[in-house]
């Protein structure tokens, strides 16, 4: 599911209340309707939208009554700043992912022994929840630093379109690139990228070597 | 701003498009209206809502024309799983926050020297964006593990209300607690907590010592 579709669904308070309720336990339409104080017809309409998006599913119990439950595991992140509006939704990463060796800037200290006893599971749950909070805090810290760097870049560059210039400079900080690569990485139209590069070249910030642009020292 | 208010705002596609546009550069109403293909009246209505929420602000330029820009820096995280629906919105953490010493399970390897030159700023931007991606990936990994632990707890406990039982066990994994503390930490009604504790005690999972509950070995 893409982020826009997910935001459209979550933009409705009653749908959020239904998800909160189903996250506690599977429910019948009548239970949801009573809990929300909303007509069964309206509840069914919300459930249909959530089901079509694949967020929830329904089954029939022994008495042939239909009940609903959350079938999906997913995460949505949105960041808003003067220099960027980003949204990202994703399914949980596989457990076999080796975060330690995949990440260049991040180390997670977490005992990944499989817990078996209830007490171990409870302790693992606790640690994972702490880790989740720490990751959130780290991300807020990164966003603060990003906003600061963007502001300083904006001051230095004195342009209206700091985002594009910053993307170009950030991409070039990784190594020399052709115009085509830069166009692809910044997702900006080719003529706009060319114009920005000329502007940066005139100011002595970037230069062209062969077919590749690079940052000047 | 709380998460619910933010989701209500972001649940509208045209408002998301306005934010994406303003994140590139400050705009007049006419520019936004042309770009979106939406009447100025509708644009003004969206801008008013975004402004009331404090996400954007307006100023008047030399020609007395009003323009709008994003004034807020914030982050929203939503997670959906069969065992939980959580949302969290927050402002960026202060730069002076020492992530390294605050986090127990997380280490960030990042050179925090203040960059001055454009090339340094570009490199820092690049690193921060990588770090942001790594943190997102780590959070998806944590969510996957959390879902797995909850599922195993649910199997072991065989209850409908795994969330509450898991919260209780997770809290007790930190050390013995009184009923009052448990009620506060799990945010569940006192009688519900007492009933769950009795159930867990009958099954030999928790026990009471003096006034405090604790996990049994």
Image (cartoon, coloured by chain):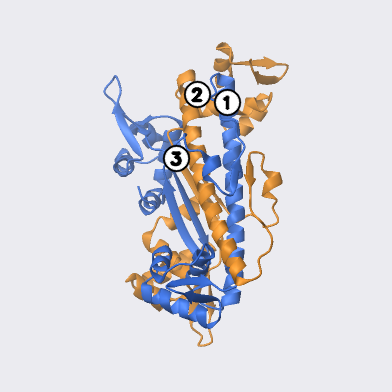
Chain colours: A orange, B blue
User: In front here: A71 or A116?
Assistant: A116
Dot 2 falls on which chain? A
Q: Which residue is mark 1?
A: B122
x and y, in percent, of residue B82 in the image: 53, 67
- Counting the numbered discs, the total is 3
Q: Could one spot residue B74 in this view of the protein?
A: yes
Asked if the residue under mark 1 is in contact with the one under mark 3, i.e. CB atoms within 8 Å, the reply is no
Q: In the rendered image, which quarter is residue B152 located in? A: bottom right
Residue A11's spot in the image, x, y percent? 40, 55
In this view, the residue in front, B103 or B82, is: B103
Q: Disc 3 versus disc 1: distance between alpha carbons? A: 20 Å
What residue do we see at 37% from left, 69% from top?
A42
Tell me the subunit letter for badge 3: B
Do marks 3 and 2 both belong to one polypeptide chain? Answer: no
Can residue A40 be seen here? The reply is no
Find disc 3 in the rendering and name its residue: B92
């Amino acid at each position: 599911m893409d982020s826009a579709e997910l935001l459209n669904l979550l933009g409705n308070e009653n749908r959020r209340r239904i998800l909160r309720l189903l996250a506690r336990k599977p429910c019948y339409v009548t239970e949801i309707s009573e809990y929300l104080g909303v007509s069964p017809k309206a509840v069914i309409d919300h459930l249909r939208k959530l089901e079509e998006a694949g967020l929830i599913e329904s089954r029939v119990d022994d008495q042939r009554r239909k009940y609903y439950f959350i079938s999906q595991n997913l995460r949505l992140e949105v960041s808003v700043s003067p220099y960027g509006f980003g949204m990202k939704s994703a399914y949980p990463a596989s457990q076999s992912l080796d975060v330690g060796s995949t990440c260049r800037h991040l180390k997670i200290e977490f005992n990944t022994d499989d817990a078996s006893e209830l007490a171990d599971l409870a302790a693992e749950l606790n640690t994972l929840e702490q880790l989740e909070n720490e990751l959130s805090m780290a991300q807020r810290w990164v966003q603060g630093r990003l906003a600061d760097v963007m502001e300083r870049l904006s001051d230095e560059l004195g342009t209206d379109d700091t985002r594009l210039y910053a993307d170009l400079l950030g991409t070039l900080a990784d190594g020399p690139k052709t115009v085509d690569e830069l166009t692809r990485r910044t997702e900006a139209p080719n003529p706009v990228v060319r114009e920005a590069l000329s502007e940066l070249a005139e100011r002595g910030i970037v230069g062209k070597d062969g077919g590749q642009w690079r940052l000047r020292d």
